[in-house]
Image (spheres, rainbow, N blue to C red):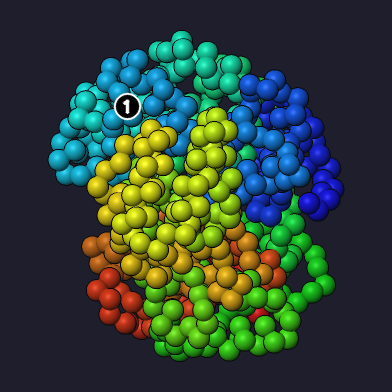
């Protein structure tokens, strides 16, 4: 483990012992601050207690847990995961039956409602609130049909914690602190749940950045992060406003995208933000980029191909780019298991990751799902996991996994095993469950890139109509950008993934909604006057 010497800003946040809100720019070390706080707290807790550490993605939670567990540090009594997984595991499955009857463990968990299920409700909901839950009988009807809808997890958890003394006692007895990262992406019920945990006596820490709010379409509301900074609830506000990740010229460019009056950082180096117009389509762009990557590998500018990321607004753009890319690559996309979003699907995903190596040891699986069992049972589980890793037959793999999944109480449905079958036969999907190969260029959407960093970033899709999103009015003179604020934040996120160099790519051809190649013009973002002189 490398020695960490905190800045004055970081030290102040790490040492503060009460509830707090941390606003942190990209590259400011917010994850390290959370890690240091958790590692400082957990040794002092009683053996039965832990902390709640909620992150926006499974990958982020696994990374935070890994960093917290370095040097044999013990966090077994703590929860690391997404807000949905916390709601499901700690509140809905143990306590919802006491309020609504039935057995929640018998329910199928769905990410999206089908057309029949939507008919249960009086309205359409992005992120249902507690008020929606109590006003619309459709939520209870859906539950009685043995369906749990993920979008309603936060509201259901609020209903539980407001009405179940047992749930309140459990949370207070089990946990001392709650941490939530990426707080700008919290919805109203998620915010209210955080406040409820705070009111129950947990010391609460919220970490976020309003400028990285990119999920309003899901119901996220960055205003809740702002509200915490106003100190109406006695949350002390700490700021981490220095970007340690990016070259100063990248910081200057990115911040000027957000704020035309941003005071530039003085530096003596050349600009490391480049704009390039490439004749043709995205396949042609990849043909231009491939030799550049080869040259960087040869001259030592980068150590490995995985230091390079290609970021796009649309996944279809990335797929077109791969047609001309003369390198091994990894295209991050949702798998059929991701689309299901059930607890059973999550376990299958982890078991596939274990089989293919991105989860390295059986102990990692045991720590996550089976730590509460006796040593005799765990020894048996190790044998089963060893068989899973060695399994070459799809049917046998599914059978062995099913036994483990049923053992920890998940209900398996045919959809999960069918999703595994689809993945098993698709090499590009299987690759997503393997450890990252150093020889693979990384391709992902801007949304998926959040929280990651790379030495060199190519930001594509920078044409009008591609990014930002445009909408035509009654005439062609009536063009609007209906989601400009969020798209601007998304552009900012993409730029700030780059440590050493960010290359902004416009192609002279773009794909329209029909998939046809049409002549393009520069993106709105490339025409911002405050960026003049900040790129090469």
The one of 273 and 284 positioned closer to us in this rendering: 284
Decide: is 484 above or below 410: below
Q: Position of residue 411 (x, y in %)?
A: 31, 37
Residue visible at 44% across and 25% down? 91
- Which residue is the extreme one toward the top? 165
Is the C terminus in the top left, top right, bottom left or bottom right quadrant?
Answer: bottom right
Camera sees residue 536: yes
Camera sees residue 532: no
Q: In the image, is 43 to the left or to the right of 145?
A: right
Decide: is 433 above or below 103: below
Quadrant in the rendering for residue 367:
top right
Q: Position of residue 74 (x, y in %)?
A: 69, 35
Q: How many marks?
A: 1
Residue holding disc 1: 104
Residue visible at 28% across and 76% down? 515
Tell me the element at label 1.
Answer: helix
Decide: is 508 above or below 193: below
Residue visible at 55% across and 48% down? 362
Q: Position of residue 498 (x, y in %)?
A: 64, 66
The one of 13 and 175 positioned closer to us in this rendering: 175
Q: Position of residue 84 (x, y in %)?
A: 44, 37
Please rate how many residues cluster around mark 1, counting C-alpha atoms within 10 Å: few if below 14, some from 14 to 19, many from 20: many
Quadrant in the rendering for residue 507:
bottom left
Q: In the image, is 286 to the left or to the right of 416?
A: right
């Amino acid at each position: 483990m490398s020695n960490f010497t905190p800045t004055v800003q970081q030290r102040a946040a790490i040492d503060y012992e009460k509830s707090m809100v941390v606003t942190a720019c990209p590259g400011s070390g917010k994850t390290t601050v959370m890690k240091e706080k958790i590692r400082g707290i957990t040794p002092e807790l009683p053996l039965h207690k832990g902390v709640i550490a909620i992150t926006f993605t499974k990958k982020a939670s696994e990374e935070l847990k890994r960093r917290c567990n370095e040097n044999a540090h013990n966090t077994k009594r703590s929860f690391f995961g997404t807000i949905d997984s916390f709601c499901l595991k700690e509140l809905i499955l143990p306590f919802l039956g006491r309020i609504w009857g039935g057995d929640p463990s018998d329910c199928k968990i769905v990410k999206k409602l089908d057309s029949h299920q939507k008919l249960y409700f009086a309205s359409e909901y992005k992120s249902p609130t507690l008020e929606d839950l109590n006003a619309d009988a459709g939520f209870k009807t859906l539950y009685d049909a043995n369906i749990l809808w993920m979008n309603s997890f936060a509201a259901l958890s609020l209903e539980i914690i407001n009405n179940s003394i047992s749930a309140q006692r459990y949370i207070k007895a089990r946990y001392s602190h709650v941490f939530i990262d990426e707080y700008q992406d919290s919805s109203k019920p998620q915010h209210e749940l955080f406040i409820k945990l705070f009111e129950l006596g947990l010391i609460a820490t919220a970490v976020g950045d309003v400028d990285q709010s990119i999920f309003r379409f899901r119901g996220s509301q960055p205003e809740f992060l702002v509200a915490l900074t106003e100190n109406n609830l006695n949350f002390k506000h700490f700021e981490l406003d220095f970007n340690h990740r990016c070259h100063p010229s990248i910081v200057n460019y990115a911040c000027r995208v957000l704020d035309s009056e941003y005071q530039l950082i003085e530096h003596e180096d050349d600009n490391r933000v480049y704009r390039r117009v490439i004749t043709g389509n995205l396949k042609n762009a990849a043909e231009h980029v491939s030799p550049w990557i080869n040259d960087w590998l040869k001259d030592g500018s980068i150590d490995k191909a995985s230091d390079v990321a290609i970021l796009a607004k649309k996944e279809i753009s990335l797929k077109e780019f791969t047609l001309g890319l003369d390198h091994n690559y990894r295209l991050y996309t949702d798998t059929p298991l991701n689309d299901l979003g059930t607890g059973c699907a999550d376990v299958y995903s982890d078991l596939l990751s274990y089989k293919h190596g991105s989860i390295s040891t059986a102990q990692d699986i045991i720590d996550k799902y089976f730590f509460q069992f006796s040593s005799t049972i765990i020894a048996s589980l190790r044998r089963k996991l060893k068989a899973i890793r060695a399994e070459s037959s799809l049917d046998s793999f599914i059978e062995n996994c099913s036994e483990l999944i049923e053992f920890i109480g998940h209900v398996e449905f045919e959809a999960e095993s069918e999703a595994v079958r689809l993945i098993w036969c698709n090499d590009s999907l299987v690759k997503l469950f393997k450890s990252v190969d150093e020889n693979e260029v990384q391709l992902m959407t801007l949304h998926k890139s959040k929280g990651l960093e790379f030495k060199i970033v190519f930001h594509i899709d920078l044409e009008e109509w591609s990014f930002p999103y445009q909408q035509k009015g009654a005439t062609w003179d009536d063009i609007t950008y209906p989601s400009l604020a969020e798209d601007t934040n998304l552009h900012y996120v993409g730029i700030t993934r780059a440590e050493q160099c960010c290359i902004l790519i416009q192609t002279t051809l773009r794909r329209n909604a029909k998939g046809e190649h049409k002549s393009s013009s520069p993106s709105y973002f490339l025409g911002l006057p405050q960026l003049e002189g900040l790129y090469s």
